[in-house]
Image (cartoon, rainbow, N blue to C red):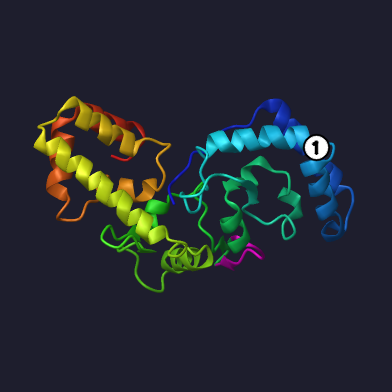
Amino acid sequence: MIKRRRRPLRTRDRAALEVWQRGLNEVPPYDKRIGDAWNAFTVGKGKPLRQRINRALQYQCVSRCVYCERSEFETIDHYRPKQQFPATAFAWPNFNGACWTCNRDKSQPLLFHHDRPMIINPMDEDPAAFFYIDPKNGFMAAALHLAEGTDDYIRADYTISKLKLNERGLPKERRLAADNLRQALKFYELTRGHRKAEEALLVACRERNALRAIVRQVMTNPDPQDKPLVDYCLQHSHRVKTFLQAIQWL
């Protein structure tokens, strides 16, 4: 899971969503009508708008699920579930791009801890402040600086468990991503900054690369065994360092 930037929606589409929301607000009780309203939005007269929203989400989420990173964007996830929070059923800030599996595992209801949602929202919070990924085995855990029992620790642990972020083969894929990045760093050092080695590092860090959370961790908070390679890269590659600064990793 990695921080994503919430992008503004086109004015006409935002206005169209507001029309759908007002229509829903006028027909209480919500729980009996939200299903019909969402079906109409998905496959009925709202389908063209839904398709534009999908494209906007795909761009915003870089075609990846905002939760697991590995899977491609497949569906609209309501961060605050529409049955539980019908007043935000058609609110753009409540939409996330997710895969079917994460959307299903997140499910309902959204639990709260001290008035904060238990599930961490990568569109509004930086997951790097909550999670640590062991590059040796690819498993995700609460960040090392979080004391057990604190609010942030509880939320991080719950998010991992609820979304099954240490299942579905994700640890293995994170470990492979870390190994591939480490090989690219070694190649860069071995070739003393060859242009092709630098390009390989840039490709590993760019937005469309899956499982970027482990890439970010290796490049910004490396383990002792990786630190000399990362330091060499940042000292000798102005392009890589500038890119990491531009995406606010450094």
**Left or right: where 85 falls relative to 213:** right
Residue placed furthest toward the bottom: 149
Q: Residue at x 80, y 37 (%)?
A: 46
Amino acid type indicated by mark 1: Gly
Q: Is residue 215 above or below residue 237?
A: below
How far across and how far down the image is residue 122, in percent? 49, 49
Along the line of sight, the residue nearer the viewer: 219 or 15? 219
Identify the residue at image location x=74%, y=33%: 49
Query: Is 194 left, or right, of 45 in this rendering?
Result: left
- Whether the magenta-drawn stretch holds residue 109 is answered as yes
* Image position, residue 204 (x, y; %): 32, 38
The residue closer to the viewer here, 84 or 36, is 36
Query: Residue 7 appears at what percent x and percent y?
Result: 55, 34
What kind of element bears circle 1? loop
**What main secondary structure does the magenta stretch of the protein show?**
loop
Quarter of the view holding residue 241: top left
Q: Nearer the viewer, residue 126 or 61?
A: 61
Q: Residues within 10 Å of mark 1 (few under 14, many from 20)?
A: some
- Magenta-drawn stretch contains 153: no
Q: Where are the magenta residues, as a range? A: 106-113
Residue that numbered label 1 is attached to? 46
Q: Quadrant of residue 235?
A: top left
Front in this rendered view, residue 84 or 2: 2
Side of 71 relative to 100 (left or right): left
Looking at the picture, how far across and down is residue 135, in whole percent? 27, 57
